[in-house]
Image: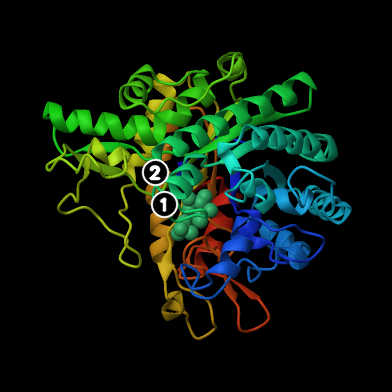
Amino acid sequence: KFYPFPTDFWWGSASSATQMEGASTQGGKGENIWDYWFQEEPNRFFNGVGPGNTSNFYEQYKEDISLMKELGHNSFRLSISWSRLIPTGDGEVNEEAVTFYKNVLNEMISQDVEPFVNLYHFDMPMAMQRIGGWESREVVQAYVRYASICFELFGDLASKWFTHNEPVVPVEQQYLYGNHYPAECDFKKAVQAGFHSVLAGAKAVKVFKEKGYKGEIGVILNLTPSYPRSNHPEDLKAGNMADLFFNRSFLDPFVKGEFPSELVDVLKTEGFMPEIQEGDLDIIANNTVDLLGVNYYQPRRVKAKENMPNPNAPFLPERYFDHYEMPGRKMNPYRGWEIYEKGIYDILVNVKENYGNIPCFISENGMGVENEDRFLNSEGQVQDDYRIEFYKNHLKWMHKAIEEGANLKGYHVWTFIDNWSWLNAYKNRYGLISLDLDNGFKRTIKKSGEWYKELSIQNGFY
Ligand code: BGP
């Protein structure tokens, strides 16, 4: 059976500045939290390999954009590094960065790879983190200035913009679970940081609209459907709470312009309401996004709480649910994440039915594999049939959602080329292209890369 996709479907992939550019101390770039943290604690997460050691897009972008073309990409998402463009976050613009991003965008246009430009992908400039990062109102202002500068400098070269990638992740990881600097566990700070991220996004949308830049502005959210263990009311309640904390906390304000009232009630009851200034909620209400990017990797399975946590322990959303390891769930055998393809369909149905069927696309989906060298053939190509299967199985569900009316515009996989990642450097490989760090960053198209090209050329697959 052939699964066709709509005309002009966006085929491509995504990455982020910190994960692909390299040159982390060159070209006038300022320090961000990753540069700083790696220097402070190189072995905490990074296996001794830091953000200076990525796939070197800063120097090899021309070759990479040709490779994107070679893989059949008609679009690609990159992010601008805030600390490259404005080294202190809120001061002088770095002219070398302006030249770099203009060169990249022009090269993409000349090769017919449409740039999707994201403004924030986990990479707070260190000078901004020192004054409080997303917790601080000043940083919201600095971000809006940064966004305005980006629209002004690059607005004629790009017409798909995104305010953030996965804004819930820095909130969780910086302030609850301790995996991004400053690695605190403080729910109050997390809520303030989350509120400010939403406000910053709405303010950026406002500037974009008021100044009349061409194209659309959206946000990219990681949506993790929360499946309860059973239909027992306590399990359903647990599922609903996880959904509120991790999905609707950002999906509702960005798309509908309001926070879910149930979530607000919980924050009030627990004493965690953020500081909100007059006019903030109107800005959020009046500046929703045009386009929604959905990152989907795995679902969240939950059950009713079995043991009440120590009331003196720091508050975490997990006070309202327990994680549930469903027996028989399908796992990625090469990394410990669940694979549940239907989740992508459930998200699209939810967006169609409950979020006005806003134009959306899958902005990340992929399979991380440890020690992928074991799948090299004698010609040195990774034979990643498991990844082709993974993509196909997700695409089938996307196809079904489109047939049923989902407003789905494209599919970007994570990722173009094996890249450096936040917590584990190169442990999990995701690329359509493999990267040989020991041999001058040599790039080799994987079997999945060849398949992806066919997918894009045929605008569908068998
Ligand atoms: C998403 C991020 C990406 C990327 C991906 C894979 O949450 O947007 O930046 O890293 O996850 O995750 P990991 O690299 O941890 O395997």
Mark 2 crowd level (few <14, some 14–19, many ≥20, 10 Å Cα): some
| Residues tagged 2 and 1 counted as in contact (Cβ below 8 A) | yes
Report x, y in % for residue 75.
Answer: 66, 46
Spatial separation of the CA atoms under disc 2 and disc 1: 6 Å
Q: Is residue 121 visible from the viewing direction of this image? A: yes
Type of amino acid under label 1: Lys
336 horizontally vs 90: left or right? left
Q: Does dot 1 land on a helix, a strand or a loop?
A: helix
Question: Tag count in the figure?
Answer: 2
The mark found on residue 447 in the picture is none
In the displayed orientation, state which residue is furthest to the bottom. Answer: 378
Give the vertical position of 167 relative to 451 (above or below). Answer: above
Report x, y in % for residue 83.
Answer: 72, 52
Q: Camera-side residue: 457 or 33? A: 33
Q: Residue at x 50, y 23 (%)?
A: 253
Type of amino acid under label 2: Lys
The quarter holding residue 231 reads top left
Q: Camera-side residue: 167 or 72? A: 167
| Residue wearing tag 1 | 392
The mark found on residue 396 in the picture is 2
Give the vertical position of 363 relative to 45 (above or below). Answer: above
Q: How is the image coloured?
A: rainbow
Report x, y in % for residue 82.
Answer: 71, 48
Q: Does dot 2 land on a helix, a strand or a loop?
A: helix
